[in-house]
Image (cartoon, rainbow, N blue to C red):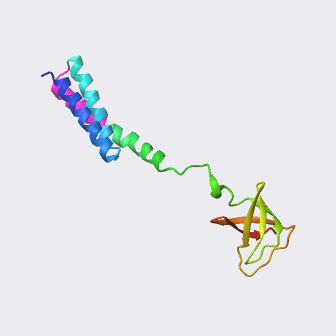
Amino acid sequence: MHLWIAWLIAAVALGVAELTTTSLAFGFIAVGALAAAVTAAVGVGAVVQVVVFIAVSLASIVLIRPLAVRRLNRRPALRTGTAALVGQTGYVLEDVTPRAGRVRIDGQEWTARPYDEMSVIPAGSNVDVLQIKGATALVHPRE
């Protein structure tokens, strides 16, 4: 059997291991095995193939893996759903009390309660949305 086939089989096995573990380590080692397979197909000796395998694998793990992990762990910059309403300004349609109230936020009517449970916000006031609980906006009067 040609040595490049063995390297190719190793690369496929390491790729499958990466798919099952998602550690981003086996995949980079598989890249090293592919580089060694190319080296073997060209006709270079076994010692050089092993050196290429180790060098490409280590370089990939040391240089590329941290960037990939950082990219995968990054939080999305776009807030959607109710999270996008937090920080918005609203307009009080009905007095906001600890028991009732309605506000208009970004063109939509929401039930509202004061963030400070003891306060009352009169109709016609502008408020800041501090939190969304279920279908209720917790608001605070603008200064």
Along the horizontal axis of the image, is 66 left or right of 117?
A: left
Q: In the picture, which quadrant includes the N terminus?
A: top left
- Where 1 falls versus 84 (above or below)? above
Return the residue found at the far bottom: 118
- Where 37 falls versus 106 (above or below)? above
In the depicted view, which residue is nearer to us: 2 or 66?
Answer: 2
In the depicted view, which residue is nearer to us: 93 or 23?
Answer: 93
Quadrant hosting residue 15: top left
Instruction: Say whether residue 56 is magenta.
Output: yes
Q: In the picture, which quadrant includes the C terminus?
A: bottom right
Pinpoint residue 4: horizontal percent, then vertical percent: 20, 24
Return the residue found at the far right: 124
In the depicted view, which residue is nearer to us: 22 or 32?
Answer: 22
Q: Which residues are magenta?
A: 44-57
Pinpoint residue 52: horizontal percent, then vertical percent: 26, 30
Instruction: Say whether residue 140 is magenta.
Output: no
Give the residue displayed 87% in from the left and 67% down from the top: 124
Pinpoint residue 103: horizontal percent, then vertical percent: 78, 64
Magenta residues, dominant SS class: helix
Pinpoint residue 69: horizontal percent, then vertical percent: 42, 47
Return the residue found at the far left: 1
Quadrant hosting residue 114: bottom right
Give the residue displayed 31% in from the left and 47% down from the top: 21
Q: In this rendering, does residue 58 appear at all?
A: no
- Where 51 falls versus 117 (above or below)? above
Q: In this rendering, does residue 44 appear at all?
A: yes
Along the horizontal axis of the image, is 127 left or right of 3?
A: right
